[in-house]
Image: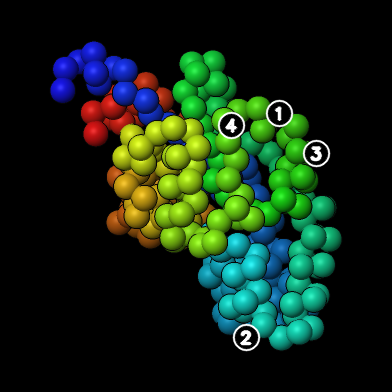
Amino acid sequence: MDNNTIANKKVGFLFDLDGVLIDSEKEYTSIWTEIDRQFPSGYENLALRIKGMTLTEIIDTYFPAPSQREGVPVLLHELEQKMSYEWLPGAKELLTWLKENEIPAALVTSSNQDKMNHLREELPEAESFFTYIVTGDQVKNSKPNPEGYLLGAKLIGCKPEHCVVFEDSLQGVKAGNASGAYVIGVAGTLPEEKIAPYSDIVVESLTEINPKSVIEILRNR
């Protein structure tokens, strides 16, 4: 493959939301701890178990009783509406650079539309950074299944192997790895050693990312 072909190869950036772009993981841990208190699931460390799962899968797996099925979504919605979202270090800067340089980016999140509506209220500019947004409502199989990332790559017109996935959860890095993408694990939600086996590299925050270097890696894959 000659240098011109490599330079013209289309590449894309695929991002998880919570714990990668916005600082919400601590709040979600508190939220699910409270939900588990009011509607006991019977499982330890529930907040860690469910990371990367859609709400439907969480309820099917951990809250199957009729009273839980009815009550958990209502309580979750109530608590989510009280959340405040802030960009994690380096996130907005990286997204801005990608937008200015016309590099396609997709958000691939397990969150549903209610959550995305609240995100619009808290961070109105967030959607403008993405060519497409894939939510948990749009996929049949949540992470660690690669369906969401495969769809994200398809929507932005890139082959999965020419995309980079940014993830912080174990389910997330497994999904990115299974999709064939280059995976950058973001430590914080979990320690580096937990996500490293399924990541090509691990960083502490997006401030460490040089997008030009990442693009070069993707174009040479």
Q: Please report the residue visible at 38 percent of the width from the left and 57 percent of the height from the top.
A: 174
Q: Which residue is mark 1?
A: 125
Tell me, yes or no, whether the two marked residues, 3 and 2, touch with CB atoms within 8 Å: no
Please rate how many residues cluster around mark 2, counting C-alpha atoms within 10 Å: few if below 14, some from 14 to 19, many from 20: few
Q: Please report the residue visible at 76 percent of the width from the left and 72 percent of the height from the top.
A: 72
Q: Please report the residue visible at 60 percent of the width from the left and 62 percent of the height from the top.
A: 54
Q: Amino acid at mark 4?
A: Phe
Q: Which mark is residue 42?
A: 2
Q: Amino acid at mark 2?
A: Gly
Q: Nearer the viewer, residue 18 or 134?
A: 134
Q: Is residue 89 visible?
A: no
Gap in angstroms between the C-alphas marked 3 and 4: 17 Å
User: Which one is in front in this view, the residue at disc 4 or the one at disc 2?
Assistant: 4
Tell me, yes or no, whether the two marked residues, 3 and 1, touch with CB atoms within 8 Å: no
Q: Which mark is residue 121?
A: 3
Q: Which residue is mark 4?
A: 130
Q: Amino acid at mark 3?
A: Glu
The mark nearer the N terminus, 3 or 2, is 2
Q: In the rendered view, would you say 120 is above or below 185?
A: above
User: Which one is in front in this view, the residue at disc 4 or the one at disc 1?
Assistant: 4
Residue 36, quarter of picture = bottom right
Gap in angstroms between the C-alphas marked 4 and 2: 38 Å
Please rate how many residues cluster around mark 1, counting C-alpha atoms within 10 Å: few if below 14, some from 14 to 19, many from 20: few
The mark nearer the N terminus, 4 or 2, is 2
